[in-house]
Amino acid sequence: MTIKSLLLGSAAALAVVSGAQAADAIVAAEPEPVEYVRVCDAYGTGYFYIPGTETCLKIQGYIRFQTDFSFGDVADNGGGEDWSARTRGQVAFTAKSDTEYGPLTGVIVYQANFRPNGEANSQSNQNDTVIDEAYIDIAGFRVGKFVNWWDADFSGETESINNNTNFNAIRYQYDSGDFYAGVAVEELTEFVNVAGDDHGGNNIGIDAAVGGKFGAISWELLAGYDIDRANGAVRGIIYADIGPGTFGLAGVWSSGPSDYYANGEWAIAAQYAVKATEKFTITPAVQYTDNTVSAAGDWETGHEWRAGVTLDYEIVENLTTKVTVNYIKDDFGDAGGDEDGVTGFFRLQRSF
């Protein structure tokens, strides 16, 4: 056998073997296409589509460090000291999708607070992690735990024109942009600053609001009725752009202490927010409250003056600071005695 014949025979054998192996070869499957996050601009900035769905999600929140201080007779920040620091972290998830009834919205807001000298689960100085809000909203109807209309008070930090503002509730609100009106049924709490108040949970409140804007003026009128305590409150606020700032005027009347208002029989407050620069706002404010002392669910006597100034400054984008200093003078009238002092806080907040 010649060398040439041997080589040709070997090549033929290899070809046969290779052909047989090729017939049994495993072909790798094509990888599944990756669905990248898509921007959803139908509901404003910050939303993106949850992969594989038509639901848009927005994540936002803030980290806040705050130091409260007080001097004089009113030097008590809930823990008895004249200064106290606190830290808060909050994150909010907002999900939206289109339906035949309009946008379907779901919101969850988690909030964690740390104040070393504060009481856990207290109404004013929490030292725990809570669900601040969690609600469903569609076609003007909202159900869940959320802040009500009373929470929208002045931009400054001097006035006292609300009480508790966060409840389990069912509400309906009509909103055309320049006009809105709504009504809510709310499960109230025992958070009323009245000695001897023995009204606990499972209390019902009826809350209503109407408001709007025209030109440089916006306004709102609220009414809340605490059924178990048989007391109600009415509040009106008006804002007007005047000169270099915005003037705000508010008035409150209440028949007695309730979850909606527990600071006095009636009060009037005013502020003027001056935008000194694009980043710096100065807001002086003043308030007078009459009949601040209560007994047996009724207003008795006393009055209070509050005056102060709030400074807001944007250090850089999403990093702001707020400083407020207030003078408070309480006269307890027939109950005897009076007190005064200075309160305030310094706040640094990073939003995202």
Image (spheres, helix red, strand yellow):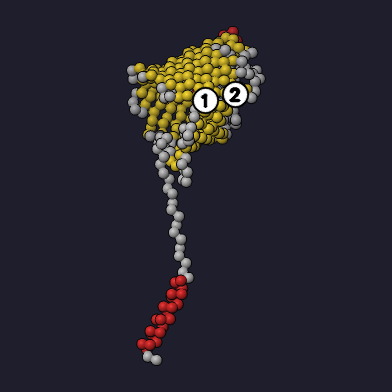
- Of badges 1 and 2, the one in the foreground is 1
- Mark 2 = which residue? 188
Q: Residue at x 50, y 20 (%)?
A: 209
The quarter of the picture where the N terminus appears is bottom left
Residue extending farthest to the top is: 334
Q: In which quarter of the image is residue 310?
A: top left
Marks 1/2: CA–CA distance: 18 Å
Q: Residue at x 54, y 15 (%)?
A: 233
Give whichever of 301, 256 is nearer the camera: 256
Q: Label 1 sits on what residue type?
A: Tyr
Q: Label 2 sits on what residue type?
A: Leu
- Mark 1 = which residue? 172
On the image, the x and y values in percent for residue 110 come to 53, 35
On the image, the x and y values in percent for residue 125 come to 56, 28
Q: Which mark is residue 80?
A: none
Q: Is residue 179 above or below residue 45?
A: above
350 sits to left or right of 136? left
Q: In which quarter of the image is residue 216?
A: top left
Counting residues from the N terminus, which is met first, the one under dot 1 or under dot 2?
Answer: 1
Judged from the image, the secondary structure of the residue bearing numbered disc 1 is strand
Q: Is residue 305 visible?
A: no
Q: In this view, does 63 lie above or below 227?
A: below
On the image, the x and y values in percent for residue 157 come to 46, 22
